[in-house]
Every structure is written in structure tokens, then in C-alpha cells.
Image (spheres, rainbow, N blue to C red):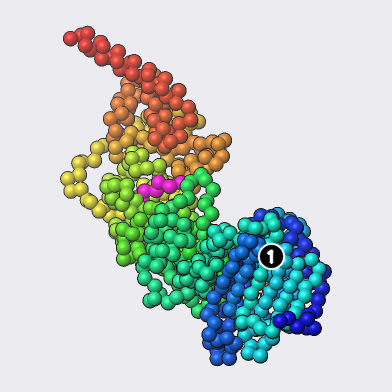
Amino acid sequence: MTDQKSAKTYKFKAETKQLLDILAHSLYTNREIFIRELISNAADALDKVRFEEVRGTKIADPDREYEIRIELDADNQTFTITDTGIGMSREELISNIGTIAHSGTAEFLKQLTKDEKQGPELIGQFGVGFYSVFIAAEEVSIRTRSFKEDAVPCEWRSDGTGTYRITELDEAPRGTRIEVKLRDDAKEFTEKHRVENVIKKYSNFVPFPIHINGEQVNKISAIWREPKSSINEEQYVEFFKFIANTSEEPLTHLHISADVPIQFHSLLYIPKTNIEMPGFPPPEVGVNLFVKRILVQQNSKDLLPNYLRFIRGVVDSEDLPLNISRETLQENLALTKIKSVLVKKILTHLSEIAEKDKEKYEQFWNEFGRIFKEGYADYGNQEKIFELFRFNSSHFDNAEALTSLQDYVDRMAEGQEQIYYLSSQNREVMEQNPHLELFHSKGIEVLYLYDPIDEFVMSGIQKFKDKELASADQIDPANLDKIKDKEKKEDQKEEEKIDTKELGDLCARIKNILGDKVKEVRASERLTASPAVLVNPDGTMSAQMEKLMQAINKDAKVPAKIMEVNGKHPLIKNMLEIYKKDPKDVYLDNAAENLYYSVLLLDGYLPDPHRMVGNIQEMLTKSSDLYVDKSQAK
Ligand code: ADP
């Protein structure tokens, strides 16, 4: 029985009216959000009463289960949500529901009038909460009874236009029951399937049972808040499959509960497979941010640095405001601290895997190494990050094996002060690179880089444990003299004598033939097998870096390089003989040009192959003439 004398009608404030008007008439997309808001309020109310009970307060109806019940009634077109939470007194109804207490609301209104399409998104960010019910409601009634034992139950009723009415009730159980009379265009919210999907999407980890028409729909609890010891491997896997929407098991998980410097819980996963494809926009994945168990941001990009963007999972903190928006989130001090703790924990976790389970770590590296390498610029964590990097190297006989920088340093020869690397598109091409000959002959290990980002990574690292990193195609061969040959060859052949004066003359002649194409032609000290190589003048970038720059700027000119020739190679020796007979012999022109084109081709630069093809065909013709003559003479 309702005591009509206690009934009173109140007017909404202008600001509230304006908000209600927008909610009711301007928002058509993503309207389901009101369900999330109502469940979020119910869960809050349950949290609060549980807290009261825990601290020993006497509460009304102590035997009522903590739960949320949703009744869908298609005939009457109603959506009713009941919680057994803390409830509200008449005064609280007026101050909490009747007025916009929310500091974010004014801001919300301002934003909303700028861009109404953003409405539903903004509701989520600003947590205008309860009022969002008017997106779908024709009329709303709230029946509520505070947890305080002597509280008087009340009903609040409004159609969201200008006024609301509060009536005292004779009787009501502890908690709040909100009945939403749905508008004709919002009938879909009486469909169980529809509502269940909304709950699965936003509220599945609310730590109280949610029932729809008597059936519990949220089976998974907030496992990230549970102590690690109470969760088994299977549950961890199941939760990953749920949040990542996959049937694949994760590679590894990391469960964190922190109290200092900030309180939060987190459960993070590294998947087995990288779903990011080069050349396509990165997929919408990330870490879900919960505040007090309520999802406030799905796939948040703000919780982890970009180089850890493949990590999935949940972060849940009591120390963040529920109504946090993206903008305020980025500036939030608590979040900055959470982020910093997360990064450190993840890096430590990866180090542990690298140490204990090499195979698993390499599995991680092969999938995500390319993204993780972007972390070279995270200055605060560089040391740890560099230790986690892996590269193929000349130490191995295949392209799959990986080494850490530390292992490379441990293998360094006496007197070696630098870490050497070289870039190429793959191992096969790498092994053809003449720059490696000197390193191979001295048994010095070179890191093999196959990824375009590696050049940037290497110039970002610069130094690892006091050892400078140097590109093998840029060093002065004299630098390697100090290094003790690891594999000292006892039976080294006697050094061939080369007449440096004569070779110098040939070099001058070749420079003359090539003209501006090269900066200089000189005798090489780095070659043992190849006839020639192109070397960058001091202080310029490595060949691979140049190529990257060219890819970015097509018009960038290949700078003139130094061509070094190997006086011990049969071709150079023959050229020298020809030169000595007749310095003007045209064979030299042809050979010098071809040699230049061939080393340019090896470097990956040859812009126009026509000239080279013409030259080769001319030389083929000449040599086949010789062959024909010879056979005729027989
Ligand atoms: P917010 O939840 O962000 O504070 P709302 O507009 O959703 O904003 O709710 C305003 C206030 O109304 C809440 O802070 C809470 O005090 C009260 N409230 C809303 N729903 C409930 C409920 N189901 N039980 C108890 N109190 C509630």
C-alpha cells in the first residue's frame, strides 16, 4: 500500500533536463550501453553492502544473497533489474538520482552538443550512468530500500521529461529494483539472447551472479582478483580464450597483484600467434581496463607501451575513477604508475622464460620479436630490453638459430671491442656479401639482421655492456688487426706478393673508366674471395640504412662509393697483365664497368640493368669467338 501523503513531485534541474532530452532523442547507436550502466551500479551497490557487512555493520535482510536479477517481459515491454545491494534512502534518491552530482556531466553535455554521434561512447567515458536508461525508456520506476535497518523504502518514478515523483512504500526488501518500461523502438531489450550478449560483452566478470529470467548468465568470475594459488592452469587458459575470442591456448600468462606504489590486479597473456599483418592496420586488441571490476575500456591502448601491443588481458584497479575518459586516463598519475609496474613485470617475466625455457622464448621471439624490437626506444627499460633481443649470426650454420647480445659478447675473441652486425634480406643473400670475408677469415662473429627495423634498432642500441655496435660494411679493416684470430690457421699459405705500385696504377685506370660513378678505387685489405666490393666513405650510413632511406624517398641518390679491388683475385690479376701490355686495352673498360655493375647488383642498387646486360653479352660474344676459333683449329 502506498501512502499517497508521502508522495512528492520534484523538478529536474535544467542541466539534467537537457541531458535527458539528448539521451531520449538523439542516441540511436550502441544503445545497449544502458544495460552496462545499470549492472555497473548494481554491482557497486553490492560491493558497498558487502563492505558494510565485512566491517560489522548490521544490515537489513542479512540473509539475502548478493546477486543481480534481470527480468525480461516482452508482453509488458519491460526490462527489470534487481540487486540486493546497499539501496537508497529517500534523501539519497534525491541527491544521487534526482540531481546530477557527477562532475563529469557538465563536460559530457558540452562534448555531446559538439558531436551527438559520439554520445554512447561518451556515456561510457563520463559515466553519466543511471540516466542512460532514458536512451531506451518510456518510463522508469526505482523501488529501493537502504541497507540501514530502520530505512523507509521508496519509489522514484519518472518519464524523463521534466519531473520525477518519490513515494514512500510500506515494504520492500533490501536493495534496488529498477523497472524500465521500454519504448517501442527499444523492444529488442526484452530478448534474452540480446541482453545476454550485452552482459557477456561488458559485464561478464562482475563478481556477483547475474540472472536473466532466473538463469545465471555470467559463469566466469573475476579470476584476476583471486589469489594465484586458487586458480589452476585450465582456468587461466579458459579466461584467455574468452577475452581473446580464440580457441588457441596462450603462450604464457602473468598474474600480478600489486599494492605499492598503487593497488591493482592484472592478468596478462602473450598469445601464441601474432595476428598483426605487416602493411595492414594493427588489429583492435589490447588490455581491458576494469575499475572496481567494471569494464571501462576495452582493448585499451593506454595501459602498455606500443611495443607490447600484442599482450592481452585485464587490469583492474580500485585507485582509478570509474568515470575516467581516454584523455584523463593518459594524464592519470595512478595509471602511469600501473603502466610502469606492468612493463617491468612483463620484461622480468620474459627474461625468466628466456632463461628457463629457450624454446618457448624463441617461439615468442619468432612471433612478436618484430614488434617487441620497437622497444629499443624505451629508454627507461633499455638494458632489460636489449638483453631480450635475439639475432641470427654467423656463429650458426642456419638461419633459424638465435643468439642474445650477451651470448655474442661471451663468445668475443680476445682484443675484440665491438659487436659486429650486417643487414640483408635473408641468410642466402647475406652469405654472398663480400664484407663478411674478412670476418670469416679471422673467425669473428657477425650478427645477421634480416628485418628492416633492425638498422634503427642497432643505431638505437649503440652500445651493449660497453661494447659498441658496428656495421660490418663500415669498419676500417685495420680495426680487426688487434683481434686475435680465433682459428689461427697454422698452414697458412705464404702471402702472395702484390706489386702495390702496379695495382695502384690499375686502380687509377679503373677510376678513370668509371668516372663519377665511384668516389675512389683502391686495393682492398678486406677481401679474400671476391674480386671487388663497394665501401661507404667514412661517416656515411650503412648500405642497408641507405636502402631504407631510398625506400622512403625514391629520389634519394645513391652516394658515390669507394670500390675496393682484390689484387689476389684471378680476374684482377688478369686485368693487371692486360693493363701492363696495353693500358688502353678496351677489354679493361668493359671489364671494369661489368665489375662495377656486378658489385652494385650485389649491394642491391643496380638502377638500370640494360647497360650491364649489354656489356655481358658483348663479353660473352668475344669469349665464344675464342671458343669457336679454338675448336676450328683442332
Ligand atoms: P555513478 O554510478 O557514476 O555515480 P549514476 O548516475 O549511475 O552515476 O548513479 C548515481 C548514484 O546513484 C550512484 O553513485 C549511487 O550512489 C546511486 N545508485 C545508482 N544505482 C544504484 C543502485 N542500484 N543501488 C544503490 N545506489 C544506486
Q: Is residue 51 magenta?
A: no
Extent of the magenta region: 447-452
Q: Is residue 450 magenta?
A: yes
Q: Residue furthest top?
A: 632
Q: 69 or 45: which is nearer to us?
A: 69
Image quarter where the C terminus lies is top left
Please name the residue shown 77% across and 73% down the image. Answer: 164
Q: Quadrant of residue 596?
A: top left
Q: Position of residue 294 (x, y in %)?
A: 57, 70
Disc 1 residue type (three-letter): Lys
Q: 244 or 352: which is nearer to us?
A: 244
* Some atom of ligand 1 lies within 8 Å of the CB belonging to the residue at label 1: no
Tell me if residue 176 can be seen.
yes
Q: How many marks?
A: 1
Q: Position of residue 210 (x, y in %)?
A: 53, 70
Left or right of 456, for residue 69: right
Please name the residue shown 36% across and 71% down the image. Answer: 232
Left or right of 20, for residue 517: left
Please name the residue shown 58% across and 83% down the image. Answer: 49
Q: 571 or 427: which is nearer to us?
A: 427
Crowding at label 1, few (<14), some or many (≥20) Cα neighbours within 10 Å?
A: many
Please name the residue shown 28% across and 50% down the image. Answer: 396
Residue highlighted by disc 1: 181
* Rendered position, 62 above or below 216: below
Q: 371 or 59: which is nearer to us?
A: 59
Q: Quadrant of residue 201?
A: bottom right
Quarter of image, ligand 1: bottom right
Q: Position of residue 66 (x, y in %)?
A: 54, 78
